[in-house]
Amino acid sequence: MQTTVQLSLDLITLPEALETAEVAIRAGVDWLEAGTPLILAEGTRGVRELRSRYPNIPIVADLKVMDGGYLEAELMIKAGATLVVVMGQAHEETIESVVNAGRDLGAKVMGDNMAMPDPIAGAKRLEELGCDYIIHHIGYDMRTLRRARGQHAPTPLDRLREVVDAVSVPVQAVGGLTLEQATDTPKYGAPLVVIGAPLTIDAYAFRTAGGDLQGTLKLICEKVHAYGDVTVKQEARA
């Protein structure tokens, strides 16, 4: 699979999200994500506006579905989402319902293994239930509070190779990665690179002078795209 850069629009106002999306597309970002904060703040409107402006760009709706799977997925797909996210901690029936909605309405499903007791077995189960992609995810609250308490906070890189080896569909790693770590995930066999926005550019070495968002994203896209194809056992289902 060709390496892909996905920008997560974890913003709470639509104008800021649209402005950031425009910068991202100019920089060469491949996929746009309507992040959970944006969906909570704007509902389907955020997805509709992104789809209206970018008719040919894949749009991920990070719904984090836990129940009411078919309806929630349907709302976002009909608004223009091409991919929706369901949580692996949901009932299997919910995961199946989201998968059914995706198949009925022509969208892909990303299964998120955050907080599953065994992330490797969880990723395998999500694939078995029909998810087209796996998100190997370490949650914000867990890693942030653990660090604040002086405790060890895992990163998605700790077990990323195990997840990639366990499934045959494409994988992405999410949660607390620096820009350098995120752009290196194709080395682990994970072709989908997620970059969070807003970017705290000054916190990382991988940046352009003056905190130039478009320039930074352009450098990220160039680095990721330079990997070319990453071997995936089974490309995401057609």
Image: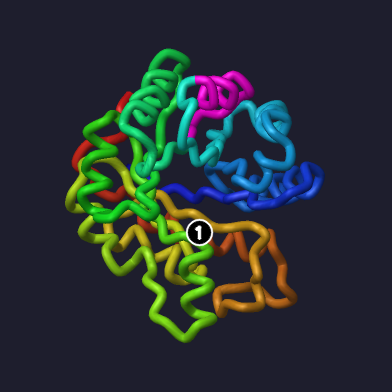
Q: Residue at x 29, y 38 (%)?
A: 126
Q: Residues within 10 Å of mark 1 (few under 14, many from 20)?
A: some
From the viewer's perspective, tell me whether residue 50 is left or right of residue 153: right
Element under disc 1: helix
The image position of residue 7, as x and y in percent, is 57, 50
Badge 1 amino acid = Glu
| Magenta span contains residue 75 | yes
Name the residue tied to disc 1: 222
Image quarter in which the C terminus is found? top left
The image position of residue 116, as x and y in percent, is 32, 52
From the viewer's perspective, tell me whether residue 105 is left or right of residue 56: left
Q: Residue at x 59, y 22 (%)?
A: 75
- Answer with the quarter of the image where residue 47 lies: top right
| Magenta span contains residue 191 | no
In magenta, the rendered stretch is 71-84
Asked if residue 94 is positioned above or below residue 214 in the image, the reply reads above
In the depicted view, which residue is nearer to us: 145 or 119? 145
Residue that protrudes farthest toward the top in the picture: 104
- Answer with the quarter of the image where residue 148 lies: bottom right
From the viewer's perspective, tell me whether residue 79 is left or right of residue 148: right
Asked if residue 203 is positioned above or below residue 188 in the image, the reply reads below
What predominant SS class does the magenta segment belong to?
Answer: helix
Asked if residue 133 is positioned above or below residue 171 in the image, the reply reads above
Q: Residue at x 48, y 32 (%)?
A: 83
The image position of residue 40, as x and y in percent, is 67, 41
From the viewer's perspective, tell me whether residue 155 is left or right of residue 140: left
